[in-house]
Image: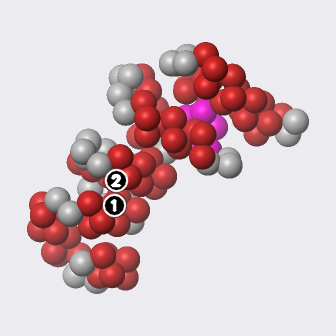
Amino acid sequence: MVKCIQSGLCPERYREWKELGNEWVLETLAENGYFLEELIGSKYSDVKLAVLHYNPTFSVNLIKGNKHHDEIYDYVANETEPNIDILKDYIESDWDSEITKGALIKYQRLTTGG
């Protein structure tokens, strides 16, 4: 299933495969842009993180709704050049002042080159 999704084969079966709930299949679907609205609510952190990597705009609403903090933190902390809007919203949310300081430094580096 994973190889088929990665190759774009058998797309008519993706919904059926998603319903099986296999973490690797779900993550691969997210990595390839399928069912993002549904998969952002997955019980698997790696699946949610794959959604954020594929479409970072999902995290803006999550930040404002104060949901999925760990996944958003992972995205902000681990991406060398995260989406600027997400980084800004993360900083403004001020979930944890120590973490926010690091995000602010990264934001300044990305927006001013310094």
Task: Let me know if residue 100 is in the magenta part.
Answer: no
Please name the residue shown 29% across and 49% down the image. 44
Q: Circle 2 is placed at which residue position?
A: 47
Residue 58 falls left or right of residue 97: left
For the residues bearing labels 2 and 1, Cβ distance under 8 angstroms: yes
Numbered disc 2: secondary structure: helix
Inspect the image, locate mark 2, and give the three-letter code of the amino acid beneath it: Val
> Can residue 21 be spotted in the picture?
yes
Residue 44 falls left or right of residue 89: left
Please name the residue shown 55% across and 26% down the image. 89
Relative image position of residue 28 (x, y in whole percent): 34, 66
Q: In this view, does 4 lie above or below 102?
A: below
Inspect the image, locate mark 1, and give the three-letter code of the amino acid beneath it: Glu
Please name the residue shown 55% across and 18% down the image. 96
Outermost right residue: 114
Quarter of the view holding residue 97: top right
Please name the residue shown 51% across and 41% down the image. 74
Relative image position of residue 111 (x, y in whole percent): 77, 35
Q: Is residue 52 above or below residue 7?
A: above
Relative image position of residue 88 (x, y in whole percent): 61, 28
Span colored in magenta:
82-87
Numbered disc 1: secondary structure: helix
Q: In which quarter of the image is the N terminus?
A: bottom left
Residue 101 falls left or right of residue 43: right
**What is the magenta segment's predominant secondary structure?**
helix
Q: Circle 1 is placed at which residue position?
A: 27
Of 83 and 79, the residue lying toward us: 79
